[in-house]
Structure formats: C-alpha cells, structure tokens
Image (spheres, rainbow, N blue to C red):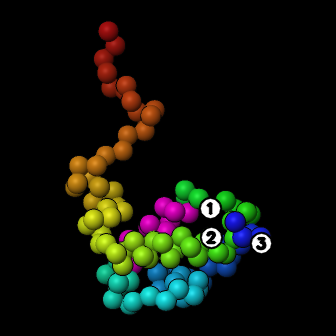
Amino acid sequence: MSATPYDFADETADCEGAEDFLEHFNIAFERSVVHVNRLHILQRFHNYLDAHAKAGVTGYDEYRGWLLRAYEDFVRSDAQTEKVFSVLQRAAGITKISIGAIGRGKPAT
C-alpha cells in the first residue's frame, strides 16, 4: 500500500471518461483500444475498486495500478471474452445467485 491515502473522489471529480482517468493517472494508452472499450475499461476498474479499495487507506499507486490493469485487460483481450457487463455474462450462460436467494421459491413440504 502507498504511504499516503488518496482521496479518489475528490482528486478525480473532473474526470468524465476513460481517457480522462487514464490521463489523470499518467497512463499511456492507445486511443483505438479506449475508443472501442471505454465503458468496459471503466466497469472493470470499478470492479477492481469494489474488490480492493479502502477509503482513507488506499493510495494513488494502488488506484493507478488497478486502472492500468483494467486497461491492459482490454489490450490483451476484448469485451466479448472479458464479459464485464452482466448482459454479456448472461449471454454466455454465466449467472450469479446470492446466498440469500438459494432455497427461495421452493414449496414448503
């Protein structure tokens, strides 16, 4: 972890698109990759933040690393393969069921 926590919301408040975030975190990128995958890159970045970021603890380097990783996921692959959005997951037969939903709908015996 970085020594200094990074106020992600405050520092990135002016970022509107994938290019803005990549430029903010000083990540070199191919515009053609971002043009085709911008929403997928941002969603994957969001997924990484949900899994790892901790407000008041996470530093700039970690945020930058997760954005770089999200971008590189789509440099090496594509949206169909990565299936970031649930609509693509459902189309591939991938479903997620919460633990709380298991057993619901069964008739009582």
Residue located at (67% from left, 59% from top): 54
Asked whether residue 46 is drawn in magenta, I would say yes
The disc labelled 2 sits on which kind of residue?
A: Glu
Which residue is at the front of the view, 87 or 2? 2
Residue located at (38% from left, 90% from top): 31
Residue 19 horizontal/vertical position (percent): 47, 86
The disc labelled 1 sits on which kind of residue?
A: Ala
Q: Which mark is residue 4?
A: 3
Give the mark nearest the N terminus, 2 or 1: 1
The disc labelled 3 sits on which kind of residue?
A: Thr
Quarter of the figure with residue 89: bottom left
Whether residue 39 is visible, yes or no, is no
Please state the extent of the stretch shown in magenta in the rendering.
Answer: 38-49
Q: Which mark is residue 62?
A: 2
Looking at the image, residue 25 sits to the left or right of residue 74; the answer is right
Looking at the image, residue 58 sits to the left or right of residue 84; the answer is right
> Local crowd at mark 1 within 10 Å, few (<14), some, or many (≥20)?
some
Give the mark nearest the N terminus, 3 or 2: 3
List the residue tagged with mark 1. Answer: 53
Asked whether residue 86 is drawn in magenta, I would say no
